[in-house]
Amino acid sequence: MKIREFTGKKSLTRFAFVIVGAGAGFAYYHFVGCVSGTCPITGNPYASTLYGGVMGFVLGMIKED
């Protein structure tokens, strides 16, 4: 893999989707969350942020096509 592959417009768009998705995942944890704390994704801020970032990555991949 070349470094140039990571500096294009597609990579910037994908990175933006990941950042927005991670922010949305953390916001969901913060504002909605899980009252009992036993939910595997929404009960943990790291898991919800990671999940949101992955979903942002997937949406960014779909948008590129």
Image (cartoon, rainbow, N blue to C red):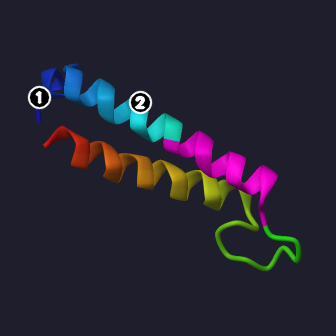
Identify residue type, mark 2: Ala
Q: Quadrant of the N terminus?
A: top left
Q: Residue at x 67, y 55 (%)?
A: 46
Dot 1 surroundings within 10 Å: few (below 14), some, or many (20 or more)? few
Residue at mark 1: 2
Q: Could you tell me which residue is drawn at 38 percent across and 32 percent down?
A: 15
Magenta span includes 61: no
The x and y percentages for residue 27 are 70, 46
Compare residues 7 and 48 and report the one nearer the observer. Answer: 48
Extent of the magenta region: 21-33
N-terminal of the pair, mark 1 or mark 2, is: 1
- Quadrant position of residue 48: bottom right
* Closer to the eye: label 1 or 2: 2
Which quadrant of the view contains residue 36? Answer: bottom right
In the rendered image, residue 43, in percent from the top left (x then y), is placed at: 76, 68
Label 2: state its secondary structure: helix
Residue wearing tag 2: 16
